[in-house]
Amino acid sequence: MTNHWVDLKNSDCVLAIGCNPAENHPASMAWINRARDERGAKLLVVDPRLTRTAAVADLYAPLRPGTDIAFVGGLIHYILENNLFHREYLVHYTNASFLVHPDFKGPADLDGYFSGYDPAKRAYDRTTWAYQLDEQGNPKADPTLESPQCVFQILKRHYARYTPEMVERVCGTPRDQFLALAAEYAKTGQPGKAGAVLYAMGQTQHTVGSQNVRVLAILQLLLGNIGLPGGGVNALRGESNVQGSTDMGLLYHTLTSYLATPTAAAHPSLKAYLERQVKAAGKGYSKNTPNFLISLLKAYWGDAATEANDYCYDYLPKVSGDCSWISLFHAIEAGTIQGLWLIGQNPAVSGPNSRFERQALGKLKWMVIHELFETETAAFWKAPGVDPATVQTEVFLLPAADALEKAGSIVTSGRLIQWRPQVAARPELAQEDIWILDRIYRALKKRYQAEGGALPEPIVQLAWDYGDPPAATAVAKEINGFYTRDVKDASATAAKGDLLSTFAQLRADGSTACGAWVYAGYYYPRDDGTGVILPSCMRRGTKDPGGLGIYPYWGWVWPANRRIIYNRCSADSQGRPWAKDKALIWWDGSKWTGYDVPDFGVTTDPAKPGGDDAFIMHPDLKAALFSGLNEGPLPEHYEPVESPARNLLSGVQSNPVVKLWDAARGQPIGDNLGDLSQFPIVATTFRVTEHWQAGAMSRNLPWLVEVQPEMFVEMSPELAREKGIASGQTVIVRSARGEIRAVAVITRRYRTLRLWDAASNGFREVHQVGMPWHFGWAGLATGASANDLTPHVGDGNTMIPEYKAFLVDIRRA
Amino acid sequence: MTKAILIDTTRCTACHGCQVACKQWNDLPAEETHNEGSYQNPIRLSAQTWTLVQMREVEYQGKLYWSFLKRQCMQCLHPACVSACPVGAMHRTPEGIVVYDDSRCIGCRYCMTACPFRIPRFEWDKPLGYIRKCHFCYDRQAEGLPPACVKTCPSGALQFGEREEMIATAEARLKAQPSRYYPHLYGKEEGGGTSVLILSALPFDLLGLPTLTSEPVAVPQSALAPFEYLGQPTLGTEPVTQLNDELAHVGTPAIALGVTAILAGMQWYGRRRARLAQEATGHAHTTKERKP
C-alpha cells in the first residue's frame, strides 16, 4: 500500500474494486466504518457479484470479470470530460505536462496497438514511447497541458473511447449505476478531499493484471489522491506476511527490497549491473543502488566479499528467462527441474490448471515440503485416483511450526513490521523454518567441504552464523544492517557491528552489510514514546500525535518509518497542506515538519527548483501517468484470453504480448483453452472469510468447517432455471481443463450480464458463476479444487495467472 | 445496571467471528453441516449453537440487500421463559442476565414454547436433555469482560455497555445518519424491552423479528409453530410475562372460585335431591345403596 490500514479512517470515499475487504480482511472494516461514521465517507464497491463488502456499501456496481480497464478507463473518461481532475497536482507532481515522441501512436490510431509492435516477437520496441528531451536531457514539458503531444492530451485521446455507453456494453454495468459511482468518486478530485482505492487479486490475476493496477494509479493521480491521508493505491495483501516475503525477494525477478535479479544477458558483471541499474534510475533515489547491492552482497558473503572479487557478485545466480510459477511447472513437467523445495505452499490446490500441475509433480525426483498438515501437495502421490506405485518422487515431509509457535516479524499490507514472540508450544517434532534451513545449510556446507562439487564456493563462503539453535533476532540484525568494520569519516563514526539506523548510512565500499535496504533501521533500538527503548519493530507505543492514525511508536514501517509514501503531495506547491483537517506534513519556512516522516528532502524548499519533485523513486522524480510496460505505456482494454465477447474497444482481442503456453495441447490434461461454443458461461474464483488459501489451516478446524463445509458454486436464479438446478443440489462445472463437482448456491447477488454483441448489433445475455478455490481432497472438509478449471496463462509482465476470468459450462450432476 | 449489546447491522459483514468465538469460549462442539445453498451455517440455533449469523437476501425499495443479523437470546427484561418455567431453572440474575440452572431443569420445555424469539433449544440427542441458550457470557461479565462475541467483532458492529448508554448511542446514530437506518431501535420497548438492541437499514419484520403493534396478543404461538425464523407472533409493548400474569392473577382465582362454585352448586343440588327423595320415601338415600 502507499498508505496503510488505519489511514482508511481518514478517507472521504473508499473505492473497493477487485477486492473484498469485508470477507478477506475483516478487521479493515473497523477503519472503513470509522470513516463512514466520523467523516460521512462513502464505501463504493465494484465486483462481479454482491459480496459481503458490497452488502454494506453505499453504492455497488456490477462488472464482468476481466473488464476493469474498461470500467476504470470509463471513470477516467468521466473525470476528464467533466474537468474533475486536480490540475495543480497534475502539473506539479506528475508527468502530465511532458511531451512524448512525435511518432507515438496509440490503440485509437492503430486499432488496438501502440506504435512499435513486432508481431513475430509478440513484443514492443519502445523507441516511440520516449519523451522529447531538451538540450540538458530533461523531458520537454507544457505546463498548460494543452500541447497535443503532451501526456495529458494523449491520455485524453486514449480514453475518449471509454464512454459510459462503452462501459455498459463491455462490462455489463448499467449506465446509471456506473454514472452514480463515477460522480461520487470523482468528488475526491477536489483539493482537500481524499479517496482511497483498495484492490487485490481481482485486479492482479489477469493477463492484463499489471495494467489493471496502472489504471488505478492513473485514476488516483488525476484526482490528486496519492500521498494524502485517506488516499492512496492500496493493495490488500492476501497472506499475513506476503508483504514481508516479497520484501525479502521471494519472487524470482527481484533480490531483497526489489533490487533487480541479475540476468545473464544484461548483468554479466557487477560493473554491468551497477551501470545499467544506475542509468535506469535516472534522477531517482535508486541511483544509490551501488550502496544497496554491495551491502546486500556483504550480508550474504561477509568477509569473503571484497572489492577485489566484486564482493562475490559472480556467486549470485543469473536468470536467463522467465522463472515464474507457470514456467516452473512447465520445466517440472518437461523434466528440467528435478527437485522442488516447498515451504508452506500447496500447488496441488492453488496452482492454475492444477490437474496439469499435480501431474507435473509426479515427474519430480524429489520433493521437500515444510508443512503443518499433510496437504494435497505433500500427499500428491497418494491422492484419490493415484496409484503410489506409479510415482517415482521421493517426498520428505518436514513438520513445521506455525506463526504463533515461533518468534519473528511479519509485515502488513501497510508496510508495518511487527515483531511477535512465540506464544504457543510446538507439537513435538515441529521446527521453525529457520531451524530446518539452518540444519540443511550446515549439512550441505560440510559435504561440500569434504567432497567438493561443481561450484562449492557460493555455498561454503556464505556468512552464515545465526546461533545454535538459530535465532530469528540474529537474522533480523543482518537484515537491518550493520557496520562491517570501524568507521570514522566525514559522514559517520561507528564501531564494527553497530546497527544501522537508516539506509542513508549504506555505503558501496564494503563497510556496511544490509540484508534489505528498505528495512535499514527496523531493528535499531528506539524509544516507544514512554521512555522504553526497544528494537523498533518490537515497540507497541500508542501515542498518535496529530490523531491521523500514524502511530509512529508502534512497530516500524518501511522505509524510514514513513507511514504514507509520496507524502510531499499532501501539500501544495508552496508546502501548505491541501486539507487543513488532515495536515500531514508542511513547510515551516526552513524545513518540512509534521506528523509523518517526510518523503522528501527535509530542507528542500518548495519554492525553489526541485521543490515539487515529489516522487523521489522515479527516474524523472514525477509520477508517471504515461509509463512503459510490456503491452503499452497506457492501460488499454483487452479481453481475457478466454472471453465471451469480441473486444469492442479495438481489433486486438486479447493482450498481444501474453505468452500462450502449449504443453500437451489437445490432451485431456494440458494447456487447453476453450471458447464460447463449448463454454458459454463466464467464471471467476474468489475467497471466503471462513477459509484460507488452499485450505489446510481452515479445512482442518471444526468450527470453520461447520460454517463453510462444502465446495460450492454461486450462480444467478436465471442460470439455475435454465439448467434445472435447485439450491443445494450438486452440479458439475466444466472448463477446457477439467471438471469438478460443487454445491449450487443460487443467489440474486449474481446477475446475468447484458453484453453488447457486435454480430447481432444488440445486447445479449451472458451468464456468470463464481467459486471459492479453497477446497481439496485432504483434511476435515474436502471438496473439488476450483483451480482444476483455471487456465495456464499469465500477465504480460509478471506471468501472474489469469485465475479471475475464464469460461465454463455447468450442468446438474 | 443491566448491560446490553447493541447490534448495528449496517456495520456487520457476516464474518462469523462472533459465531466461532461463542463456540470457543463455551467449548461447544461443531455440528456436522452441509451447504444447503447458503453461507448461513448452522442453519438454526441448537443446544450446540447459541448464536448464529442469519443471512437473508431481501428486496426493499427496489434494491437488493444481503442482510446480516446475529441471532441469540434477546436477554429480555421480562423474560417469558423465566415466567413459564415451573421450577425456576430459567431465572434472571440481579445483574439482569437470563440464565438457567441445570440442577432444577425438568426438561418440560415450556420455555421453548413461551419465547417469542424461539431461542431456548433442547438437547434432543441426550436421553435426559437440558435446555441450552446464550447466557450472555455471565462468567466473563463477572470478571468485567465483554461477551466473547463482542470482544471478537472486528468491524464495530457489536458494542457492549450499560443499557441506557447503548440506547443513547443507538439513538445518536439514528439522528446523525438517518438515511443509513430504518428509524427505530428494536428492543428498546419490544416485549417490555430486551438487552439485545438492534439497528438496521431494513424494517425489522424483513429480518424475521417479531413485529410490534400496540395490541397485546393473548397467546404468542401455538405448540405447533415452527421453531425457525419465519413469520412471528405480534406482540404489544407490555411485558410478555404480563400475558401470563393476567391469566395467573385474574384467571386462576376466577377459575378456582368458579369451579368451586359449580362444584358447591352440584353438591347442594345433589344433597337437595337426596333430601327430597328421602322426604318422599321416608328412607335415607345413601350412595351405598345405589348400585351401578
Image (cartoon, helix red, strand yellow):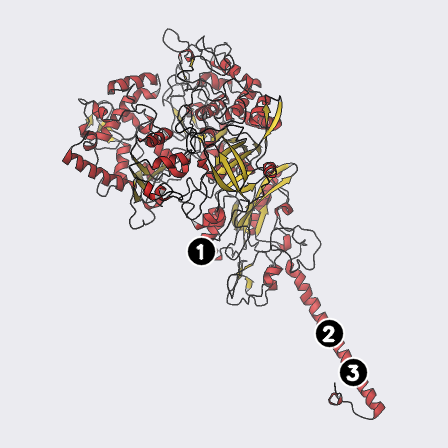
* Residue topped by disc 3: B270
Q: Amino acid at mark 1?
A: Asp
Q: For numbered disc 3, what is the local secondary structure? A: helix
Answer above or below: position of A428 versus A535: below
Q: Badge 3 local density, few (<14 within 10 Å), some, or many (20+)?
A: few
Viewed as shown, does residue A360 lie left or right of A656?
left
The amino acid on which the numbered mark 3 sits, given as a three-letter code, is Gly
Q: In terms of image quadrants, where is residue B272?
A: bottom right
Tag 2 secondary structure: helix
Callout 2 amino acid: Val
Disc 1 to disc 2: CB gap under 8 Å = no
Say which residue label 2 marks: B259
Residue farthest to the left?
Answer: A450
Residue B96 at x, y percent in the picture: 55, 58
Disc 2 chain ID: B
What chain is tagged by disc 3? B
Task: Give residue A256's mark.
Answer: none
Q: Is residue A483 visible?
A: no
Kindly report which numbered mark, 1 or 2, lies closer to the viewer in this rendering: 1
Q: CA distance from mark 1 to mark 2?
A: 51 Å
- Please state which of residues A332 and A293 is positioned toward the viewer in this rendering: A332
Mark 1 or mark 3, earlier in chain: 1
Residue mark closest to the camera, 3 vs 2: 3
- Tell me: residue B244, above or below residue B37: below
User: A649 or A57, which lies in front?
Assistant: A649
* Same chain, labels 1 and 2: yes
Disc marking residue B27: 1
